């Protein structure tokens, strides 16, 4: 049976986010699929703001389309990898399959292994800081529009957005801004205990986007999961540790 690895990128990323992982797995007999998620890369934005469930619905339909087009076979064993925003989508898909929920994915394929790379999905008090930051960003626009201050606007905005970490929001369209708010608002902690798929978790201990404490929570609540932690690595663990992740995927697929 041929193994399939589906990789879901993070917010602001694209299928190119997995260039290093593809290179690390180039000699392996694996079909690697890396779709651009709606609103990123070459994939058009959704018509309106989306939730995590709507992204999960899209991925489910996308995989089914690959089967219909003959790129995948129904009996293929699918390994699912998600980084950051892609990780929260992967968590939702794994939960649907494990919990046999009303939004269960198609029975035509199944996820046999889950890989979480600095996965988003757990809410923190810092989200309040983010909301305050969004408000400040609007105030800042007004402030720097005042006579005599316009020349300071580029530098001032850069400092402000760095302080409150609203870069993703500032660069997004109106639809994607609302989408970012919606997906960030959902806390996936309650579903972790209901995920019964073999899981490997990869995390940088210096991650400032998704704190390492999230990795510990996922390790604790997803039964039988394995945590691979890396000193000196930040949010791009899927790129910085691609060789390590590839070695684990090789082992989990029992390749020789």
Image: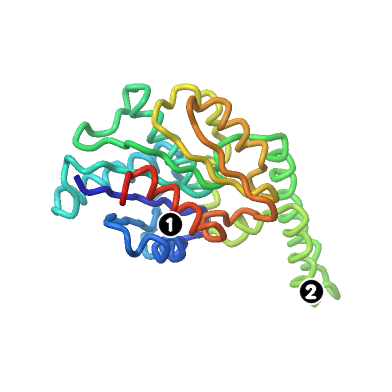
Camera-side residue: 155 or 48?
155
Name the disc covering residue 39, or none: 1
- The alpha-carbon separation of the residues under discs 2 and 1 comes to 31 Å
Camera-side residue: 150 or 30?
30
> Residue 195, position in %: x, y?
43, 27
Q: Quadrant of residue 240?
A: bottom right
Query: In which quadrant of the rendered image does the N terminus lie?
Result: top left
Q: Is residue 120 above or below residue 34?
A: above
Q: Quadrant of residue 119?
A: top right
Is 69 placed left or right of 148 in the picture?
left
Q: What residue sits 37% from the left and 22% below the top?
A: 99
> Residue 237, position in %: x, y?
57, 54
Is 202 placed left or right of 137 in the picture?
left
Q: What residue sits 46% from the left and 45% below the top?
A: 49
Circle 2/circle 1 CB separation < 8 Å? no
Q: What residue sits 55% from the left and 51% below the top?
A: 177
- SS at circle 2: helix
Packing grade of label 2 (10 A; few <14, some 14-19, many >=20) is some
Determine which residue is flagged by label 2: 150
Q: Is residue 175 visible?
A: no
Colouring = rainbow
Packing grade of label 1 (10 A; few <14, some 14-19, many >=20) is many
Q: Residue furthest front?
A: 256
Which of the two marks, 2 or 1, is nearer to us in this view?
A: 1
Q: What residue sits 74% from the left and 44% below the top?
A: 132
């Amino acid at each position: 049976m041929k193994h399939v690895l589906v990789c879901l990128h993070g917010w602001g990323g694209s299928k190119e986010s997995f260039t290093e992982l593809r290179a690390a797995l180039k000699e392996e007999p694996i079909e690697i699929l890396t779709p651009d998620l709606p609103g990123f890369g070459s994939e058009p934005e959704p018509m309106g703001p989306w939730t995590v469930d709507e992204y999960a619905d899209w991925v489910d339909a996308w995989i089914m389309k690959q089967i219909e087009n003959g790129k995948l076979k129904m009996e293929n064993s699918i390994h699912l990898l998600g980084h950051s925003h892609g990780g929260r989508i992967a968590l939702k898909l794994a939960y649907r399959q494990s919990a046999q929920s009303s939004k269960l994915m198609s029975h035509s394929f199944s996820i046999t292994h889950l890989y979480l790379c600095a996965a988003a999905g757990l809410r923190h008090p810092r989200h309040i800081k983010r909301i305050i930051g969004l408000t400040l960003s609007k105030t800042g626009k007004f402030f720097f529009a005042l006579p005599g201050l316009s020349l300071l606007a580029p530098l001032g905005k850069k400092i402000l957005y760095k302080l409150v970490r609203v870069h993703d929001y500032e660069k997004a369209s109106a639809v994607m801004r609302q989408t970012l708010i919606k997906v960030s608002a959902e806390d996936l902690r309650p579903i972790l205990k209901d995920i019964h798929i073999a899981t490997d978790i990869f995390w940088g201990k210096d991650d400032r986007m998704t704190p390492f404490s999230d990795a510990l929570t996922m390790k604790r609540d997803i039964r039988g999961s394995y945590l691979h932690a890396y000193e000196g690595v930040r949010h791009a663990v899927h790129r910085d540790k691609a060789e390590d992740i590839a070695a684990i995927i090789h082992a989990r697929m029992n390749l020789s």
